[in-house]
Amino acid sequence: MSSSFLPSSSRRRTAVAALAASALAVTLAACGSSSGDGSAMPGMPGMTTTSAMPSMGGMDGMGAMASGDGLAATSGGYTLASASATLPAGQASDYRFTITGPDGKPVTGFAVDQTKKLHFYAIRSDLTGFQHVHPTMAADGTWTAPLAALTAGTWRLFATFTPDSGSGRGTDFVLSRTVTVPGRPVDTALPAASTSTTVDGYTVTLTGELMAGMAHPLTVTITSDGKPVTDLEPYLDTYAHLTAFHQGDGAFAHLHPTTAVTGAHGGPTLSFHAELAESGNWRLFLQFQTAGTLHTAAITVHVS
């Protein structure tokens, strides 16, 4: 990583502090804080649990990271269901699915998140071909996601949503299924980790320290021809939308924006709340809009 990320000495100090905090928590637990009442801190939207915080019975059976990494089709009684196991290669296609609730029936009531009731993503197993679309829902709860042409290989399709009623009301869910696109797959090597990338004449630079399982601020700066970009337009109630996928297993993460939208001229600096559950390489996709055109910048970052 470049010098814009904190040096190794800072990371060591952070790690030491984290170990000390963990040791204190274990000590307190051993000293009689075991009332056995089964109480637990309620799940926070977009947050994940770790092995230090096992799944509690009061969370509808949701396992660790159930609402975070999205690598399962079912979580907390909610299921991403579809009859489609394959999609055609080289042509636009529709993917139809439902979200079923604990009663097995399609869910039709969803809370609005960043102007949409459901966000849908497609990503190939080599972390190429990223698509972020917004499906439409029929009255019976069937969603239709319009996908651009896909290349041969295995794709994982993610749906993120928040029920506005039932046992999952107010809980953020990330569910996924895989589909096969027929043909001979040709994988693309993941670009090396970096702190900057370019797209459509814009340079996107990242600044921040990223450590697995820990929340950290991440700053994004956008320039063009060396000059700050200050004409970012609101997109999905924010100046930029940032999504990440983990190399290897394809785990999903949405990095929540913390920069408030104050008008039609955002930038050049944007802030995000970043919590990536696993170490290793992640592919980040930053979407931002200028003059009515949506740009998608892709960059690899390494998480310690």
Image: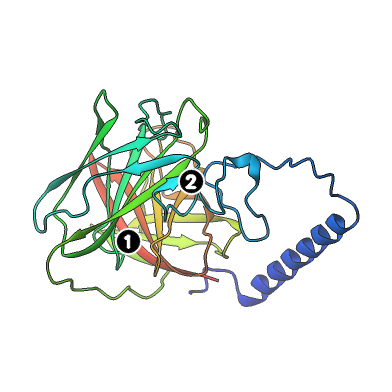
On the image, the x and y values in percent for residue 162 come to 45, 34
List x then y, in percent, for residue 34.
Answer: 84, 49
- Say what secondary structure mark 1 lies in: strand
The label shown at residue 13 is none
Q: Secondary structure at mark 2?
A: strand
Q: Which mark is residue 256?
A: 2
276 sits to left or right of 109: right
Q: Is residue 99 above or below residue 17?
A: above
**Neighbours of disc 2 within 10 Å: few (<14), some (14-19), many (20+):** some
Q: CA distance from mark 2 to mark 1?
A: 17 Å
Judge left or right: residue 288 versus residue 138. Answer: right
Q: Amino acid at mark 2?
A: His
Residue 50 is situated, as x and y percent measured from the top left of the image, at: 61, 58
Q: Is residue 133 above or below residue 122?
A: above
Whether residue 18 is visible: yes
Q: Is residue 26 above or below residue 70?
A: below
The earlier-in-sequence mark between 2 and 1 is 2
Quickly name the residue at label 1. 298
**Picture quarter with the C terminus:** bottom right
